[in-house]
Amino acid sequence: MLLHRHLAEIDGRLLADGHDVMAPKEEESYDDYRARLQEYLKTAEDIKKSDLANYVAHRRIILDLLEKAIQRQDDGKYAREDLIHNLIMPMGRTSNDIHFDTCNLWLIDERLAFHDYLASDKTIASMPITDSSETREPDLLAMKVFDNPILVSDTQKLPLASFVVVELKRPMRNDAAAGEDKDPIDQALGYLERVRKGVVQTVSGRPIPQSQEIPGFCYVICDITPTIETRCKLHSLTPTHDYSGYFGYNQNYRAYIEVISFDRLVNSAKERNKAFFDKLGLPTN
């Protein structure tokens, strides 16, 4: 606790010094300013190295927990879906009431960290981004809004947006069938369509024109069991080179679809973070 308080004091001084160092003092020579800047950067480097080490070590532990969760347990069964769900993001929460550090969206896609709104296992009706009255609960739903899109003139600053839907299934579940209640791909597309049918708006309540045209990105996280493989083929999805996933685009729903096996999820996350793990001497196997 004493060391933590000491670190907090250093962080506070560093923040204040950071503001000061950006504004050279009157009658300060260049050499004096350079010396003051170098002293600031030296302290900042030490602190940020420590922060980065904590961050990378946290990722290594989360990957270990996920890898263990998808393995068959001593009783011959697999972990429940909610255990894996909570590893990625706590259930029943939104980005408005939890800190970013409690989410591990990077497991799926690093770009999911950049969003304006994120809901985990919340009803569509409770989301401030749509006035839909639907009570279904997507596992994860995120919206990203670009208020100043590139290549749009100053007189046409209409917001651009995109939706991300993530559907999670229990490891090795093999009961996928036709219909939204049994097909996770249909479920993800159905959630996307229900959100679009409401009056889509930003979190602050500003309308987003032509919400039916907002592109969607659907991720289905599950093992590629025989029934899932059948559903992927019926949706005309293309297998990955290692047959550990499927991908494709549904023109009717204007949605990119990616089905990712748990092994592919873990291995891809390891590969993306391998350079950081190696730098800290953390195992990657």
Image (tube, grey):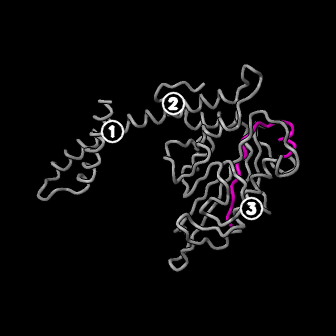
Residue 263 horizontal/vertical position (percent): 70, 33
Q: Residues within 10 Å of mark 3 (few under 14, many from 20)?
A: some
223 drawn magenta: yes
User: Nearer the N terminus, badge 2 or badge 1?
Assistant: 1
Q: Position of residue 78 (x, y in %)?
A: 74, 29
Q: Which mark is residue 45?
A: 1
Question: Residue 145 at what x, y percent from top left?
Answer: 57, 63
User: Between marks 3 and 1, how big is the CA–CA gap?
Assistant: 47 Å
Q: Are marks 3 and 1 in contact (CB under 8 Å)?
A: no
Please state the horizontal and vertical placement of residue 172, each as a whole percent of the image. Answer: 78, 33
Q: Which mark is drawn over residue 208?
A: none
Q: Is residue 219 left or right of residue 251?
A: left
Query: Quadrant location of the N terminus?
Result: top left
Q: Are marks 2 and 1 in contact (CB under 8 Å)?
A: no
Give the foreground label among 3 and 1: 3
Task: Name the side, left or right, on which 116 lies relative to 137.
Answer: left
The mark lying in front, picked from 3 and 2, is 3
Indicate which disc, 3 or 2, sits on the residue closer to the N terminus. 3
Task: Give the residue type that dot 2 points to.
Answer: Phe
Residue placed at 24% from the left, 47% from the top?
37
Q: Answer with the quarter of the image where residue 85 lies.
A: top right
- State how far apart marks 3 and 2 are (Cα): 40 Å
189 relative to 223, above or below: below
- The amino acid beneath tag 1 is Glu
In reply to whether residue 234 is colored magenta, the answer given is: no
Question: Mark number for residue 193?
Answer: 3
Helix, strand or loop at disc 1?
helix
Q: Disc 2 on helix, strand or loop? A: helix
Of residues 257 and 41, the one nearer the viewer is 257
What are the residue bounds of the magenta stretch?
213-231
Q: Return the residue at label 2.
A: 277
Residues marked 3 and 2 touching at CB (< 8 Å)? no
